[in-house]
Amino acid sequence: MATPVVMPRQGQSVETCIITKWYKSKGDKVTVSDLLFSYETDKAAFELESPADGVLLDTFFDEGAEVPVLINVAVIGQPGEATAPFMPGAPTRKTETETQPQKASQPGSPAPAATGVSPPHTDEKIRISPRARKLAGNRGVSYTGLKGTGPNGRILVSDIEKALKHLPETKPGTSLPGAEFTEQPVSNIRKIIARTMHASLQNSAQLTHHMSADVRRLLEARKKIKEGLASGREQQDITLNDMVCWCVIRALEKFPEANSHFLGETIKTFNRVHLGIAVDTPRGLMVPAVRNTDTMDIRKLSAELRAAAEACRKGNIDPELIKSTAASFTVSNLGNYGVEMFTPVINLPQAAILGVCTITHRPADVWNNQFVFVPYIGLSLTYDHRAIDGGPATLFLREIKEQIESFKY
C-alpha cells in the first residue's frame, strides 16, 4: 500500500514550509531514513527522511514551493500503485497574489522561457507567490505566459529560476566573462539571521568586555582525556569547548543576573541554566538550547552539547529549542577559526553572550621575575547594559576566568 509523505508541522506557530531541495527524484528507490528533501520554516532549516521503503512514485511540489503543513508532498509505494488519491487539493493557506485565477498546470510541469525583460503589463490576472514576484522584478523577467508548477497553477520561485536559465546574462550566481559581480537570492535562513542580528543591535544597549584566562589546567585535562581514549580508559571525548561551557555554567550559578532575559518592564532571572550554543551549519547559524545544564556532570553536558549541534547540522532539531527564548545564556566559540577577539551579538531577549576566542601564548611572571610563555584563551562578554551594569558584568567575566584557571577533571 502506498505511503504518503507529509510536510511536518515544525512548531505550533508554523503554517507553511518552503521546499529548498529534493534529494530524490520521481522513480528513485528509497529506503527508510533516506533523505527525501530539505525545507525551511520561518525559523530554521530541516531535512525529511523517508517514512517507508519503496519507490518515490510522485512528488507534488517543486523546489521553492511554499507548502502548508500536514499536506501530502509525495507518495512512496510500489510501481503501478495509484498516486491520484494522495494528490493535495486546493491549498489550505493562500500566500499568492491572486485576483482572477488562470488555468492550473500540473505539478512538476516545466516552466517555459521568459518572454521579456520587464514586468508584465496585461489585463490577465496571474497567480504568483510574493517571493516569485519579487525575484522576477529584481531580475527583470516577465512572467506573462509562465505556467506555474505550484498548487492551482501558482508561479513559484523555482519557475522564475527556470525561466532565468534562458537569460544567462542575468542568471543569479553565474560569473560571466567581463561581469563585474555575481548575485544570489537571499535564502530564507539568511533573511532570518539578518533580521535577528539587526534587531538585536537596534533594540538593546550592548557593550563588550574582553579578558583572558590561563588554560594550562584545561589543556592538561584535554591531554589526559585524549590519552585515556587512546588506551581505552576513557569512553567519551570531552572537548575544550565542553570544559569552557562547564566553567560558564558554574559562573552563572554565582552571578544569576547574567542568566536572565530583559523584557522591558521586567527582568526574568532563571533558576536553571539553559545554555545556548552557537552552531555553524551549511544552512546558516543556529543556536539550540540545552536545558537544565546546571544539573549535569561534565560528561552528560558534553553529550548533550554534541547531540544538539548534530541535530542542527542534520536539520532535525526541535524548533522550540532554537527560539531565542529557549536559552537563558549563550556561548559562541570561534577559537577553532583562530579568532583572537570579537564582539558577539546578544540573542535577545537574553541579557548576555560569551564569545570564546583562540588560545595564544604570552609571557607571564610565574615566580620571582621568571617569565615563561603561558597559553591564554580569549573571552569576550557582550551584555545588555539595560539589564546588567558594567561592574557586575566584569565580576561575572572574572568568575569565568577563575573557573577556567581552577578547573579540575
Image (tube, rainbow, N blue to C red):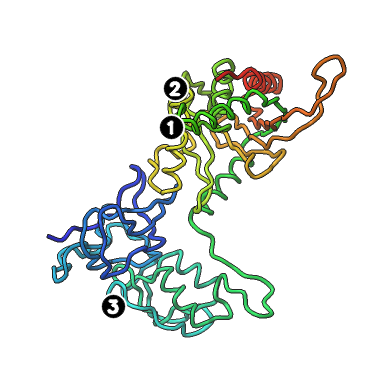
Mark 2 or mark 3: whose residue is earlier in sequence: 3
Q: Are marks 2 and 3 in contact (CB under 8 Å)?
A: no
Mark 1 or mark 3: whose residue is earlier in sequence: 3
Spatial CA span between label 1 and label 3: 52 Å
What residue appears at the point 59 percent right and 19 percent down from the top-left corner? 251
Q: Is residue 146 visible?
A: yes
Q: In the figure, is residue 193 to the left or right of 102?
A: right
Residue for badge 2? 296
Residue 82 occupies quadrant: bottom left
Spatial CA span between label 1 and label 2: 9 Å
Badge 1: residue crowd in 10 Å (few <14, some 14–19, many ≥20): some
Spatial CA span between label 2 and label 3: 60 Å
Q: Position of residue 12 (x, y in %)?
A: 33, 42
Q: Are marks 1 and 2 in contact (CB under 8 Å)?
A: yes
- Callout 3 amino acid: Lys
Residue for badge 1? 304
Mark 1: secondary structure: helix
> Furthest-left residue in view?
1
Q: In the figure, is residue 59 to the left or right of 394?
A: left
Residue for badge 3? 103
Q: In the figure, is residue 307 to the left or right of 27?
A: right
Q: Position of residue 333 (x, y in %)?
A: 60, 38
- Callout 2 amino acid: Met
Q: Are marks 1 and 3 in contact (CB under 8 Å)?
A: no
Residue 196 occupies quadrant: top right
- Callout 1 amino acid: Glu
Mark 1 or mark 2: whose residue is earlier in sequence: 2
The residue closer to the viewer here, 261 or 329, is 329
Q: In the figure, is residue 168 to the left or right of 212?
A: left
